Structure formats: structure tokens, C-alpha cells
Amino acid sequence: MDSELQIGLIGAGAALVVLIIAYNKWQERKHRRHAEQAFRSEHRDVLLEPRDGSAATDEEDGRLEPAFEAVAADDQDPEVAVPKAPATARPVRESALRRSTPDAPEGLDARADCIVRIESIEPLDVARLWMAQRAELDGISKPIRWFAFDDADNVWRALTAHSAGSYHWFCAAMQLVDRRGPIGEADFARFTGGVQRVADQFLAVPAALPARADTLASATELDRFCADVDVQIGINVVSTGQAFAGTKLRGLAEAQGLSLEDDGSFHARDEDGNTLYMLGNLEPALFTGDNLRSLQTNGVTLVIDVPRVGNGVQTFDRMMQFANQLAESLHGSVVDDNRHPLGSEAAALIRGQIAQFHEHMAGHELPAGSPLARRLFSA
């Protein structure tokens, strides 16, 4: 009886031990699962992605994701997943690079230029483009300039009939205003239509065509402002007896650094080659290298083009100094257009007027003597 009780107690104890061990194993596995879930992330782990492209491809967005399958092993938990290598690797899709529209070339101004940029899918030869645009745009009354964008140097290149090379981006610009007035509807239509036809010939695409009404309104407004400051000031040196000899005039002018040019006048220029003031004949005959040898004149005129000259007051003073030198050397006198003597008071009044015009231009962000001013106040 006692032995049967002992055997029963031993069996119950063994069963209890087995249950405790099983319970501990169950708890251990439960905690391990929680730990794995805690460290698992929904973000891509670049350390798990193969570098040789051997991974499954996400069909929706082209990304590569690792694939897993469950395998059972004697020394591994059956629920642990290991990467599965695909039979063949699929290449990564690369998105095509798109060229962004470059800014307008330096020196152009949206207030003063009608600007159209053109994109060519394949590089377009400059010589072909130049011939095509000449056929379409010749005869427009305002200056037109062309540029090509150099991708290698990230810069616009001004084009001429002698330019070479092939480019993806081009720019055409028509000046809106000069001293003859603003563009009209006919100029706008011919320019924009001509640029569009040039682009069509080479399967190129204008980035955007400017609005007709806005462009014409801007041209009219700019021309009105230019008319307000378009002033040229002249002073004369006239003979008081004997006429001035051309040979002596030439000698005096060249001694002051002036040079005779094709327009029949002597020009005083700054270090950049821009005209500061001019010396011309007060009589109808223009100065030439040939006629100066025998020419006799009763007067000369010196002219400063106010909006085209920076430092206008200093330039006027320089011109007045030369005029007084001429009068002294040629035995003449300095007078205004009404032949009244031009003294210090009149000269001071002119200086003040020049300063006011230059301040007005600077206030409209169009400085006198700037490249834009010289373009707008051209013939």
C-alpha cells in the first residue's frame, strides 16, 4: 500500500516538473516573439539590401526589396525567416534627366526685351538655326539678338553669323524701344510667329511665348519714360572773323584724344570705348579725312548725349573745357544755339539739368550710361 502511494507521488512530481519546464519554454518563446516585433521596422534597411541587384523588384515604384521565406532547420527556430535569392536579378529603372529652363541671358531685361527661349531635344547646329532665323526675321525694325546656352560652362553665348557648335537651348530677344519709338503689333506678330516657325523647322519647342497685350503695353510705357529723359546738349564754337581751317581743327581734336569716325564727327571716348561727347561741323558738310585738308568752316558744335553718358556733369565740364580751348586757339567764341555767349552762369544751369535727368533715370533703375540705356537711346 505504501509502495503504491510512493509510486503515485513520484509520478505526480514528475508530471509537475514536465509542466513547469513546458511553461517556461512557452514563456521564453513568447518573450522572444515580442522582442523580434519590437526591433522590426517598416523602413528600408540598406544593410539588408544586396548590392549586386539580386533582390525582388517592387513593380509600383521601381524600388528593390528583399524577399523572405520560412525554412526549418535542426538548429534554427522554424519561425525565423531567411532571405530568398531570386532566380534572376532585374535592373533598377533610372528616371530620365530633365533639363531645367535656364534664366534669361545676362544683359537682357524683361522691361526692354521680348524674350523667347527655345529647347531642342537633340543638339541643334548654330549655323542651321542662324540661316533659318534670317529668313524669318529679317526686316523687323528693332534689333534682334540670339544666344545659345553652353551646358558645359553654364553660360549663354551671344551668336553671330560666324558662330559654331550645337546646343540644346537657344534664346531670341527683340528690343522693345529705341529712339524711333516702341514696337507695334506688326513687329510683335512677326517676331513671335517667326521664332515659332524657326522652332518648328527643327522640332524644337519655345518654352513660352510672351503675351501680346502685356508686351505692347510695356513697350509703350517704356517709350514714354525714355522720351522724358531723351536730351542732347550742344554748345557751339563760332568764328568771330576768319573761318576755321580743317587741318587745325583736326590737330586740336586729336591732341585731346578725339578720333574721327565714319559718322563725320570726332568722338571723345571713355576707357570702355563708349562715346562721351562729339565734335562735328556746324555747317552741313561732314568731316572726312579727305575734306579736312581743304575744309574751311565758320563753326563747330560739341554734343553730349545725356542718357547715354555716365557721370554726365563731369563729362560736360570736360567738354566745356575743350570748347574754351578751341575758342582760344581758333579766335572764336563759345555760344549756345541762339548764338548767345555761354558763360559760367549758363554752364551751371546746364550742369543742374544734367544732374536732374540722371537722378530721374536712376530712380527708375535705368542708370544713365548703362548698357541698357545705351541700347534704348540708340538710333
Image (cartoon, helix red, strand yellow):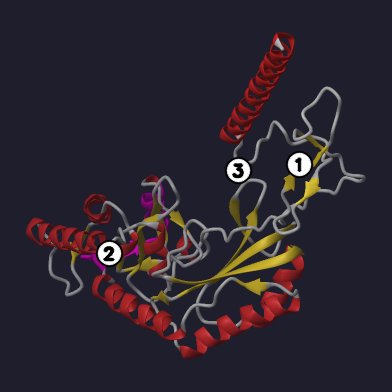
Q: Earlier in the sequence, mark 3 or mark 1?
A: 3
Q: Earlier in the sequence, mark 2 or mark 3?
A: 3
| Residue picked out by circle 3 | 42
Query: Do callouts 3 and 1 mark residues in contact (Cβ within 8 Å)?
Result: no
In the image, what residue occupies the spot 58% across and 71% down? 207
Residue 304 in sight from this viewpoint: no
Residues 90 and 377: in front is: 90
| Residue picked out by circle 1 | 66
Q: Which residues are magenta?
A: 232-254
Q: CA distance from mark 2 to mark 1?
A: 104 Å
In the image, what residue occupies the spot 65% across and 28% down? 26
Residues packed near mark 1 inside 10 Å, few (<14), some (14 to 19) or many (20 plus): some
Q: Is residue 99 left or right of residue 364?
A: right
Residues packed near mark 2 inside 10 Å, few (<14), some (14 to 19) or many (20 plus): few
Q: Earlier in the sequence, mark 2 or mark 1?
A: 1
Between marks 2 and 3 in the image, the one whose residue lies nearer the viewer: 3
Residue 356 in sight from this viewpoint: yes
Q: Quadrant of the C terminus?
A: bottom left
Element assignment for label 3: loop
